[in-house]
Each structure stands twice: as C-alpha cells, then as structure tokens.
Image: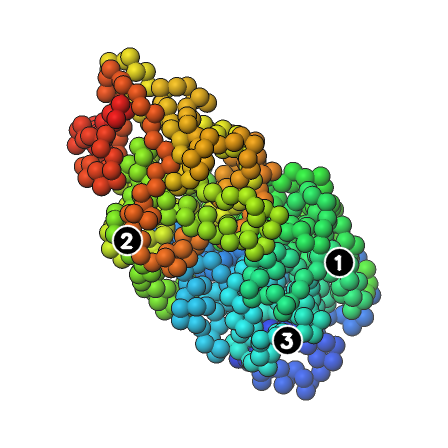
Amino acid sequence: VVAARTGRAGGRHMPVKRPPHTQPLLQPLGLFMLEPSFCQPTRISRSVARFGALALAAILAACGGSDDDGSANAGATATLAVLETTDLHFNVRSYDYFKLAEDKSYGFERTATLVRAARKEFANTLLVDNGDTIQGTALADYEATISPIPCTQQLSMYKAMGALGFDAGTLGNHEFNYGLPFLNQVLGGGLDVEGVDATKKCAGAGYPMALANVYSSKTKKPLVQPYTILERTLTAKGADGKEVKLPIKVGVIGFTTPGIMNWDKRYLEGKVYTEGAVEAATKYVPELRAKGADVVVALLHGGLDSAAYSPTMENPGLHLSKVAGIDAMVMGHQHSVFPDAAATPAYRQTGVDNKAGTINGVPAVMASSWGKSLGVIQLALQWDGSKWVVNKTASKSELRNTQSKNAAGATVYVEPDAAVAQLIETQHQAAIQYVKTPIGSTDFRMSTLFADVGDPGAIQIVNQAQQAYVAAYIKASLPQYAALPVLSVSAPFKSGFQGGADYTDVAVGPLAINNAADLYLYPNTVYAVKVNGGDIKNWLEAAAKRFNQIDPAKTTEQSLISTFPGYNFDMFTTADVQYEIDVTQPVGSRIKSLTYLGKPMDVAQEFVIATNNYRATSGKSFIDKLDGSGTIWASPDANRDVVIDYIRKNPTVTRATNGAAKSWRFAKATTAGPVVFSSGANALSVAQAAGLTNVSLLAADDGLGKGTSKYGIDLSK
Ligand code: MN
Ligand code: MG
C-alpha cells in the first residue's frame, strides 16, 4: 500500500515476500514494521535480514520520514485510494472454461492492470477483496474437488492475487461452498470450529481476512478475526505544501450474507451461526476505533435493498452505512455496479447518490463481478496532529472498467497483466482437461434447431434440473411453500440469431462439463417465483410473441418466427402442463386449452416456477410479478451448475426421459399458403427424430446468407 509495505520509494509496487505458512489471521507485517520501536537499529537489521535489501530504502524512509509526535504536521492532507475487487469467482483468466475460449470481457488478469495503473496514480493505496473469490469457474471446482490443491500450495486465485499484493479481504457466501475444512486449508488454518483441525497450517490466502458476523458454535467467537488493523505510512502534503510521511491505522471489518446458513446448510448447520451486519458493526466498529483506527473500511459482501432491516437480510448496505464510525463501504454480492447512474438497473434507493458515489453520505463502491471493474474510493484525509480524520464530502468513489467503448464506438479492453496468467498456467491447462471429461452420456442429439416448432430436446433437461433444485430447496428451507407445485420454464437461448451454427447442438455420446455451456448459454442464476394459474397463462402469452400472427386465408408464404428473441420463448416441458399456441390469433390471445394434471388450470392456484435471475427480476413485460416482487428465492447457484449437477446425478440422458416431454403444440389451423421458418442447414432428420412429422425442408439455402435452410410447417397436422 504505502512506503513500508510495498517499497513504493522507487515508484513501483514491490510486493513484500512473506515467509511460507504465514497465517492469514495474523496481523500483516506492515503493522509491526511501523511500530515506533521498529525504528531502532537492531529491529531494522533483523527485518532487513528477513525481507532483503530491497526493503531497506523503504524502511529507512518510513522511519526517517515519520514525525515522532506528528503534531508539527497538523493540517497535512492525503488521499487514500481504497481499491476494490469483488466477486472475482476464481476468474483469474479471461477465459470461458465452458466454451473453451478466451473471453476478454472479464478476468482478474485485466483488473490487475487497472490496479497497477491506480498504484501509479495514487501515492497511497489499499487493495481489498470483497469475497466470492474461491468459487465460480471450472478451475475452482478442479482445485477444490477434482484434484484438491495440497496444503502447501495456494489456490490459483490467491496465487494470482498475490502478484498484486492484497492488503485485506472478507469472505463471500461462496467461500463456504466447499465446506469448512477446505476453507480452513485455503485460508492457511486457524478456523476453530467443529470438524476442522484448527492447528493445520497451510499456504493461505496471502492477505488477512476479516469477517465480523459469522461465529464458531464451538468457541462462540468469530470464525475468522472480525477485523484487522493495517498500520501504514501515508505520503501526505504538509500544511507548508511539502511532502511528509505520517502513520495511519486503517481498520478493515468484513460482513457476509447470513444466507450462507441456508445455502450451505449441510456444511454449516450446528457449526457456525451468523449475526446481522448492523449488529456486528455496532459491536466491533467502536472496538476498532478504541484500538486507534483512524479510518474504518467496511467490506460488505452484500449490496443494497430498500427493505426494512433484519439481521438475516442479504443486502443490508443502506442500513450498514448508517452505523457510526464507518468511513467507507465496499460492496458486492449483487454483481452490480455502484456508482453508475447509467447502469441498468441502477441503484436508486433513498440515500443512494450515484453522482457523489455515496450511500447515506458514506463513500461506497460495488465493482461488478469477475474482475470486470475495479472500485476506487478516494478518501480525503486530514491530519489533526495526532490522527487522521476523513473528510467524507471531499471523498469520492468511482468504477474503472476493463471494457469500454472507444471514440469509434468499438469495444476495447484493458490489456491483461502478463505476470498473472503465467503464475497459474499449469493449473489452467489441467482445468481445461477436466472440463472435457465426460460426466454422463446422451442417446440423442440435444438441439434447439426445432425448439421453435416443438422439439424440447435441449430444454427439458434444463427444466428438470431447475425443478429438482428448487423443489429440494423449498422442501429443506422454505416450508411455507412446501404445498405448492414446483414447475420450471426455460427457453432456447441459442435459436439461430447469429446464423445456422447458433443453436444448442450436443451430439449423441459422452456429455462433458463444457457441454453444459451449450445447454445453458448464460451465466444466470436460478430464481424461484410464486405465481398463480392466471399469471402462468399471461406469462405464456408473452412468450408466444415469438410467433408472427398467421393469416390462414393468405395464399402467399408467411414467416412463422417474429423478431421476439428466442431466449424469451419460455416454455414448460412436462406432461403435467399442457397447452396449445394458436398462431392465427393476435398476441395475448394465443394460449389455448391450458391444463395442469389433465384439468383446466385454475387461475387462482398458486405455483412456484423455477426460472432465472433475469426473468424473475426484469421480466415485467411478461407479467408484473417478474419485476422481482414474485421472487421467493434468489438462489446463489448458476443454472448451468445446476444442470451439471443434475447430469452427474442422472448420467444416462435419454430421449425418452429427458427430451420428449412436449408441453405445447400449435393449435391446428389449415392455411391456404405455406408457413415457413429458417433453421440450421439440412437438419430435417433432427426434426424427424423429435417426432415432428409436420416439418419439411423447402430449400437447403434460404437465401439469408447465414448458413440456414428454409423449412415449412403444416399447421393442420
Ligand atoms: Mn458473487
Ligand atoms: Mg455472493
């Protein structure tokens, strides 16, 4: 961060090398290096022996530049730039392990470049990570479960972060996904909790974690230290305009989502318990102040929600910001951005100031996810003669993105930091081999080539996986909804928009993990919404916008598919729900003969529908309840991971079990002229294998220049 810690004297960041087996729970070296007693010859020489000559200049600068009582420098000012990464989710590389291809839109290797630039720009920086760090890519799964990383080695994510040198961090909900023994190992040891060997010493994260609202049931103490105090030296501007070095104590306190108790119940029940962020802050922030923290930075693995406060609320940022003594708030978990008034959706709750970058006056930031942004809070500090005081109104926050548009409107990306990729190359390659490993097999070609005309072959397994996942969760954790039927909808995400190759198309044979990306294109998460039969009808009516209105009397050719995106064509794929889509009718009057378990669906009957975060929160154009208000559970898990998990548990995928349940068909209509649509080239056999006998191939080349053929559909059959 500052002189002593990083050797910034030469203008470059020089991470301090820590001895192996450093416990993350210990105070960082910086603390001891700046104790007043440190600036004595014997301690200096001992430290030089430990850290090498490179640190010498910095150590001497810190000692020589510090003012013993500081009072002479009253009125000095400094800017401390708090740099945030959050929800990295083990995306070290700009690489999609499902598609087995580079994706420049994310990756810590690019955020790293932004960090280095910020360190050049600001004399005083503090780099913090806000959690959801160790889970989220195939590489994460590989190091946690497939070929577990040995105790002596750092997780690749932490190793990569070590190239930049983080000052502190907190734990997200996903840190608990692999259980407490694994967490203990990757943090280096010290978790005194049932089922864990707290004395085990491992490589660790490489920076101290702070987490104030998760307690060990065994010790009744915080599982991880609730806060850490980082002692640093700031390069400041004296009242006389000259540069001056002054010491600072930065208190860093962390909070995570109480939802971990539900999401990782099997690992955590009876072993840990949580407290609300506000309660934990009310307890520990005064303690931090009493220990001399000049500045308190709250790392909240959570975001903003305008609901009234409760100790189990997932996103308590609006409430936490009001706890006295918090100078800056680093947020995450929602994978959103703050400040950004132009974002969709942007935070607009009372107390939120997107322009100043403050929440109830507290400078705050939320840096997206996967390394797409670096959060920067510039804390304006004033030395009162004995301590630093934050000038909140002169402070500001901003996001720096790895992706932007240039003057010509083209997307440009920050270049990756070469050192980062190199550090994890061996493990990266091993993960690539892992995702190619079969987890099951399919006896049919799972494709969306004819999903628009009734083949559920690539959608049913997604619905089966989502349904099973939500039903199991409700049974375990939401007993108030246990009596409601759980159904699932999904859509053909790849439906030819980009051309003839833009379809889900998984070949007969082995199913590997990376095939799940083809079955579920987007990194969405599973959401469950409560709706009634009337809502379902309206939802399906909206989804049926996928079709143009067909005039049966027209003798000329009519195109079946509208411009309404395929990914919005939500459908059920279960014998339990049956309906017809009458494309001869206008939008809003197309769903006919809707039944549930063989009887007309009762408009008042309540159902839980498994879907995704996008539909559940921004699907108001489908039905009002899809504005987020109908959500009964926002799961932390990706739909894709849920599909993978389902295939692992049900590895023999067959047409009969996983690809033949048609919930809908077109209402029969005799048309005077042909009704046509485009799909992948020469794929009629796929339609036939799905039992769609009313489809015919009209032209191998439909003339659109996108590698598609023209097909006809006989709606009278
Ligand atoms: Mn996350
Ligand atoms: Mg999270």
Residue 625 in the image: above or below residue 650: above
The amino acid on which the numbered mark 3 sits, given as a three-letter code, is Asp
Quadrant containing the C terminus is top left
The residue singled out by tag 3 in the image is: 192
Residue 567 in the image: above or below residue 464: above
Residue at image coords 61%, 62%: 170
Residue at image coords 34%, 38%: 662
Label 2 neighbour load within 10 Å: few <14, some 14-19, many 20+: some
Image color mode: rainbow
The amino acid on which the numbered mark 2 sits, given as a three-letter code, is Thr
Residue at image coords 25%, 49%: 444
The residue singled out by tag 1 in the image is: 279
Label 1 neighbour load within 10 Å: few <14, some 14-19, many 20+: some
The residue singled out by tag 2 in the image is: 442
The amino acid on which the numbered mark 1 sits, given as a three-letter code, is Glu
SS label for mark 3:
loop
- Label 3–label 2 contact, CB within 8 A: no
Side (left or right) of 325 relative to 506: right
Lower position in the chain sequence, tag 2 or tag 1: 1
Distance between mark 2 and mark 1 Cα atoms: 51 Å
Distance between mark 3 and mark 1 Cα atoms: 22 Å
SS label for mark 1:
helix
Side (left or right) of 322 relative to 111: right
Lower position in the chain sequence, tag 3 or tag 2: 3
